[in-house]
């Protein structure tokens, strides 16, 4: 039996010479093959700006002084406290979700209620420093090379900052990265139900059955209880929000606009990242 002559090649990943007996081998080890595939996938994701979106939304029960924010969803994960979720519980839960998907864009649809409920248990003086004009001015950087971002506010073991109610960011003290949660509602200038309505939409993000479930959940918010129906509605709304944002991102990328994961909070952001405003046609004489 005639043995095949060895083929001398150079690994396309580490550029080390190696021998093989097959013509189509391009890498010196399976480990380098896997690394090259991962690099190719990352390049494709960067080229097409294939962001992952994770919805953040919460639910409350009771009315007036008896209102309690009892359920917080992040994608399909949920945290609950029947006595009312405290700010540090909310941030701890969200941070764990961020660690699972650090490259994702986290946000929701008109999050003013959720931001207020999450942070209403903050010490008043800390909240004043985060959101009031005087508090923001007191955090202005003086010797940071023109950096306009104010210093964050430290609350216990957390650093917190906010861009009004458009976006919050936070991290455990000592961490280098931030979790951003953006309010994407202003992109649509409509209710969530109107934005996802499948009727007459050539590219719907929901089935009619899913739409009906979300509509039913919103109609029962005033009498909602922390039960499986609430959990299902909350999870479904986050899933559908992510689909809606992925569709919006595809439209932006087609227009050569690539928003970073932390900038999904308002109508002005696409113009800051390359979108040209449509010019009206000049009037003819």
Image: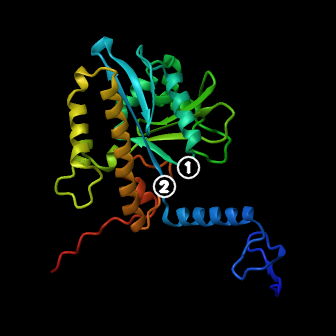
**Where the N terminus falls, by quadrant?**
bottom right
Upstream in sequence: badge 1 or badge 2:
2
Mark 1: few/some/many CA within 10 Å (<14, 14-19, 20+): some
Expressed as whole percent of the image width and height from the top left, the position of residue 167 reads: 45, 39
Mark 2: few/some/many CA within 10 Å (<14, 14-19, 20+): some
* Circle 1/circle 2 CB separation < 8 Å: yes
Query: Which mark is drawn over residue 51?
Result: 2
* Above or below for 55 versus 263: above
Image check: 69 left or right of 211?
A: right
Residue 61 visible within the image:
yes
Residue 191 visible within the image:
no
Task: State the residue position of label 1.
Answer: 103
Colour mode of the rendering: rainbow
Residue sitting at x 64%, y 64%? 39
* Label 1 secondary element: loop
Residue sitting at x 74%, y 74%? 12
């Amino acid at each position: 039996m005639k043995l095949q002559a060895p083929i001398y090649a150079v690994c396309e990943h580490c550029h080390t010479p190696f021998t093989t007996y097959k013509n189509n081998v391009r890498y010196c080890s399976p480990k380098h093959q896997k690394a090259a595939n991962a690099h190719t996938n990352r390049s494709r994701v960067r080229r097409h700006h294939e962001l992952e979106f994770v919805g953040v939304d919460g639910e409350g029960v009771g009315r007036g002084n008896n209102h309690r924010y009892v359920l917080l969803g992040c994608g399909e994960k949920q945290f609950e406290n029947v006595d009312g979720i405290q700010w540090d519980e909310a941030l701890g839960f969200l941070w764990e979700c961020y660690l699972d998907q650090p490259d994702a864009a986290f946000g929701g649809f008109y999050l003013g209620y959720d931001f207020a409920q999450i942070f209403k248990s903050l010490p008043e003086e800390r909240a004043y420093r985060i959101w009031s004009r005087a508090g923001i001015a007191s955090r202005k950087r003086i010797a940071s090379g023109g950096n306009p971002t104010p210093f964050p506010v430290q609350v216990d073991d957390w650093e917190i900052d906010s861009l009004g109610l458009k976006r919050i960011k936070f991290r455990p003290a000592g961490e280098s990265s931030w979790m951003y949660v953006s309010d994407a509602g202003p992109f649509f200038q409509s209710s969530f139900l109107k934005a996802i309505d499948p009727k007459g939409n050539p590219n719907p993000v929901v089935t009619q059955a899913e739409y009906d479930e979300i509509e039913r959940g919103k109609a029962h918010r005033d009498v909602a209880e922390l039960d499986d129906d609430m959990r299902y509605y909350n999870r479904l709304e986050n899933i559908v929000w992510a689909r809606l944002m992925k569709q919006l991102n595809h439209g932006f990328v087609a227009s050569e606009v690539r928003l970073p994961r932390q900038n999904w909070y308002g109508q002005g952001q696409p113009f800051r990242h390359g979108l040209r405003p449509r010019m009206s046609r000049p009037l003819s004489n």
